[in-house]
Image (cartoon, helix red, strand yellow):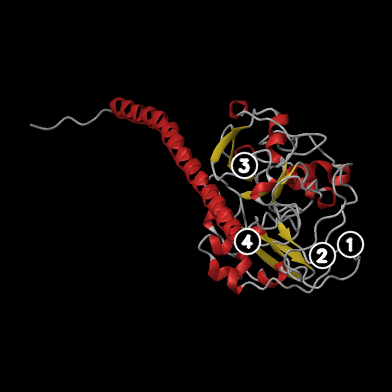
Amino acid sequence: MQRKAFTLIELLVVIAIIAVLIGLLLPAVQKVREAAYRMSCQNNLKQLGVGAHNYHDSYKRFPSGTNLPAAVLLPNAPKTYPTRTPNPIVPGQSFSFFTALLPFMEQGAIAQAMNNVGTGTLAAGITVSGKAEPGNDSQYNNSNGPNSLGATIIKTFLCPSDTGIKQTTWQSGQVVYYFGANSYGGNAGQVSFYFDAMTQDGIFFINSSVRIQDISDGTSNTFLFGERNRIDPTYLPLAQTSSLEGRSGWAWANQLGGFDYLFGSTLTVPYPINWIIPPSTMTDPGFVLQDNRCMVYGSQHSGGANFCFADGSVRFVSDRAPLLVVQALSTRAGGEVVDQTQY
């Protein structure tokens, strides 16, 4: 007996049923995948927190947000805030807190091989001395090629949900430098950028030397590290650059203070978590929006971002959290009272 074949209508019905099932299944798969990414991101932050506390156990302080070879003047710091940074903890060198934490995150070989003594200068009027400061610009030692130490892509420094490029570039003169990207940054306080206006009321800032006992607001109520969303379609044209990162290299190996890995909550005009520059923005006089975008917290997770607090705990903070609460969580000794139910 000859078997009856499928009719065209039956085949189309089967295809339609399969399409419907895939349509129903795909969001569930994506939801499970994002949940896994979010957990992996939290684990990255946990490792950063453990590394920072192990560093503190060894040196009785957290690493400097960025170690620069001279104190830096802060002419635009808000009133009642210091108008200069501390002197360097490690004279004659420049490096980020990421670099300082490498030996405490099973990346000691990279740290040992890096050369943190540069030959460049800080801009005149920026350093307290106002003259050449040997030791600056060490990132150019470590990031002079796609396979250089500073260009290393370190998985722990990148959130799996982060769709930004994993290696960034920066051109100085005729030379292109390469940097491994990062999704995370340290809490510098209410203002981290532009760096001459830093409030220095967080944990990590230029030449900082914050101890656990300095966090009088409570370690469970103070940010240590947080996420930043590297994707912002409006930032690119405003920065007038060919790279997504614009003025910021989003680079863990860059020694410059403020825009690559030190975040804030903004003092006078606080911006919520996951804030991006409004799409209708055509101009940005004084780089105000870009500066604020460089230091605002955010992520590509839905509804908020992950944070590691100073006690080492990792929590998800909603982007609907009141702005004053985000500001309070950014200060180490502001005297604010914050309840976890507020975020």
The answer for how far apart the CA atoms under marks 4 and 3 are is: 18 Å
The answer for how far apart the CA atoms under marks 4 and 1 are is: 26 Å
* Element type at mark 3: helix
Task: List x then y, in percent, for residue 30.
Answer: 45, 37
Question: Compared to 73, does 199 lie above or below?
Answer: above
Q: Quadrant of the N terminus?
A: top left
Residue behind mark 1: 128
Residue behind mark 2: 70
Q: How many residues crowd around disc 4 within 10 Å: few (fewer than 14), some, or many (20 or more)?
A: few
* Element type at mark 1: loop
Closest to the camera, between mark 3 and mark 1, is 3
Residue appearing at x 84%, y 48% in the figure: 197
Upstream in sequence: badge 2 or badge 4: 4
The answer for how far apart the CA atoms under marks 3 and 1 are is: 32 Å
The answer for how far apart the CA atoms under marks 3 and 2 are is: 29 Å
Residue appearing at x 72%, y 32% in the figure: 336
Q: Amino acid at mark 3?
A: Thr
Can residue 147 be seen in the rendering of this structure? Answer: no
- 131 sits left or right of 291 in the view: right
Which residue occupies the foreground of this view, 256 or 179?
256
Which residue occupies the foreground of this view, 63 or 244?
63
Closest to the camera, between mark 2 and mark 4, is 4
Residue behind mark 3: 219
Residue behind mark 4: 59
